[in-house]
Image (tube, rainbow, N blue to C red):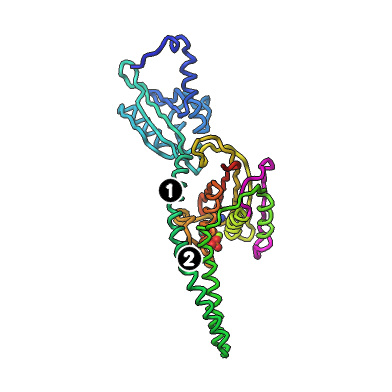
């Protein structure tokens, strides 16, 4: 039984309106005829639909992209059952990429105990889920990195011994045919050595050298470098830079390495007439690595290409060393990139909706790093 104070009774009807508007959770109430009778402001934000478009309309029209929630509301109305603490995907309009919401569905019961409809309470928990996933991935990658760098360290010394011996052997040999063999040995050792150094980069001892850094000259330099070297491809680069982004405290060498890896991947993924769009934006992200949950101004650098996209199976393994689909790739670019973004207290996200529809890589870096 809900007991109300006189204040509530006298300030009615605005009390209820204010109450539902103030709630952070989206609330949808359907009546016995499965028509929507209440749709609060948070629900408008989650669904992207205004309440004036849905009040009085059939529930299954309003939730046509979210049949799971629709079915639960219908079931709850017919059976009187409640469904608590569920998590499901929510489709905003006809968007192909759903986000995760937590969901409670209960019957709407009046004071006589009759069921008058059903209620859904929906909370957008997508960002929390993403952060949880990032956190798990960081932990997993950190142990993979330790292992890889440990192995690299062990391989490096014998490798230089082998290289020295091969060089000596080459010097001693007079037969040109045999010299060719030693050249192959030395060339391959140099290749393995590059991989080993790449691996050691994953757990560098030198901590980043932060200084005020303007990211635009870094991006521009990489773009002109890649434009010059993208053999046979006529790639169009489009830049949409937000001029209001201030210089940030960053290690410019490492940012350069980061964006070179990402832009080069995009260049390698596109066909002859590829397009690569680089966009920068500022926004407030109150969750980003901020333990006290204060709002943090964040810079977003997005690299979007119209290349071949990323296969679902590869997508699950990205950022892990040696995951590559390229003949000559080492599969270290993204692993190193992830590490660099972590060093800058940022996060990196890859979106590849469907094969052939290209890839979007988003790098978030806090503008004020503490
Ligand atoms: N923009 C992109 N479009 C399509 N696939 C991509 C893109 N970026 C990364 N990938 C996929 O992720 C894999 C891993 O990328 P990563 O940069 O770590 O290694 P790599 O490019 O294969 O080798 P390298 O060590 O030379 O960078 C790639 O082989 C490719 O399959
Ligand atoms: Mg790469």
Residues at circles 2 and 1 in contact by the CB criterion of under 8 Å: no
Look at the numbered disc 1 and say if its residue's Cβ is closer than 8 Å to ligand 1. Answer: no
Q: Determine the residue located farthest toward the front in the rendered image.
A: 206
Q: Which mark is residue 153?
A: 2
Q: Give the answer, above or below, for where 245 lies relative to 120.
A: below
- Disc 1 secondary structure class: helix
The residue at label 2 has a CB less than 8 Å from ligand 1: no
Binning the other alpha carbons within 10 Å of mark 2 as few (below 14), some (14 to 19) or many (20 upward) gives: some
Dot 2: element = helix
The question of residue 233 being in magenta is answered with: yes
Residue 317 percent coordinates (x, y): 45, 56
At 58% across and 88% down in the image, what residue appears?
176
Q: Is residue 239 above or below residue 226?
A: above
Q: Nearer the viewer, residue 199 or 271?
A: 199
Q: Which residues are magenta?
A: 227-252
Q: Which residue is mark 1?
A: 136
Mark 1 crowdedness (10 Å alpha carbons): few <14, some 14-19, many ≥20: few
Query: Residue 112 at what x, y percent from top left?
Result: 31, 15
Quadrant in which the N terminus is drawn = top left
157 in the magenta segment? no
Of the 4 image quadrants, the one containing the C terminus is: top right
- The percent coordinates of residue 148 (x first, y second) are 45, 62
* Residue in the picture at 53% in, 34% down: 294
Nearest the viewer among 3 and 178 is: 178
Residue 214 in picture, x, y percent from top left = 67, 48
**Side of 177 relative to 66 (left or right):** right
Mark 2 / mark 1, whichever is N-terminal: 1
Q: CA distance from mark 2 to mark 1?
A: 26 Å
């Amino acid at each position: 039984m809900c007991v109300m104070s006189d204040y509530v009774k006298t300030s009615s009807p605005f009390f209820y309106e204010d109450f539902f508007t103030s709630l952070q959770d989206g609330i949808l109430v359907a009546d016995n005829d499965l028509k929507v009778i209440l749709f609060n402001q948070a629900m408008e934000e989650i669904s992207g639909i205004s309440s004036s478009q849905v009040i009085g309309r059939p529930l299954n029209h309003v939730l046509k992209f979210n049949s799971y929630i629709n079915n639960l509301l219908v079931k709850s109305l017919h059976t009187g059952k409640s469904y608590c603490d569920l998590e499901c995907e929510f489709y905003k309009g006809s968007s192909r990429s759903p986000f995760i919401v937590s969901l409670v569905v209960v019957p709407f019961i009046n004071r006589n105990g009759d069921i008058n409809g059903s209620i859904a309470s929906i909370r957008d928990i997508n960002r929390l889920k993403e952060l949880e996933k990032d956190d798990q991935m960081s932990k997993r990658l950190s142990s993979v990195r330790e292992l890889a760098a440990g192995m690299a360290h062990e391989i490096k010394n014998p490798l230089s011994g082998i290289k020295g011996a091969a060089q000596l052997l080459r010097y001693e040999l007079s037969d040109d045919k045999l010299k060719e063999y030693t050249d192959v040995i030395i060339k391959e050792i140099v290749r393995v050595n590059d991989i080993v150094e790449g691996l050691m980069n994953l757990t560098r001892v030198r901590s980043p050298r932060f200084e005020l850094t303007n990211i635009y000259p870094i991006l521009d330099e990489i773009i002109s470098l890649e434009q010059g070297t993208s053999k046979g491809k006529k790639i169009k680069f489009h830049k949409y830079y937000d001029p209001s982004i201030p210089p940030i405290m960053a290690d410019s060498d490492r940012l350069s390495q980061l964006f070179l890896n990402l832009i080069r991947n995009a260049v390698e993924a596109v066909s002859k007439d590829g397009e690569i769009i680089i966009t920068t934006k500022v926004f407030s992200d109150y969750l980003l690595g901020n333990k006290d949950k204060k709002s943090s101004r964040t810079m977003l650098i997005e690299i979007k290409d119209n290349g071949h996209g990323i296969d679902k199976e590869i997508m699950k393994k990205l950022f892990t060393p040696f995951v590559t689909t390229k003949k000559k790739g080492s599969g270290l670019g993204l692993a190193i990139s992830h590490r660099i973004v972590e060093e800058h207290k940022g996060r990196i996200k890859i979106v590849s909706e469907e094969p052939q529809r290209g890839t979007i890589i988003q790098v978030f870096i806090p503008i004020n790093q503490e």
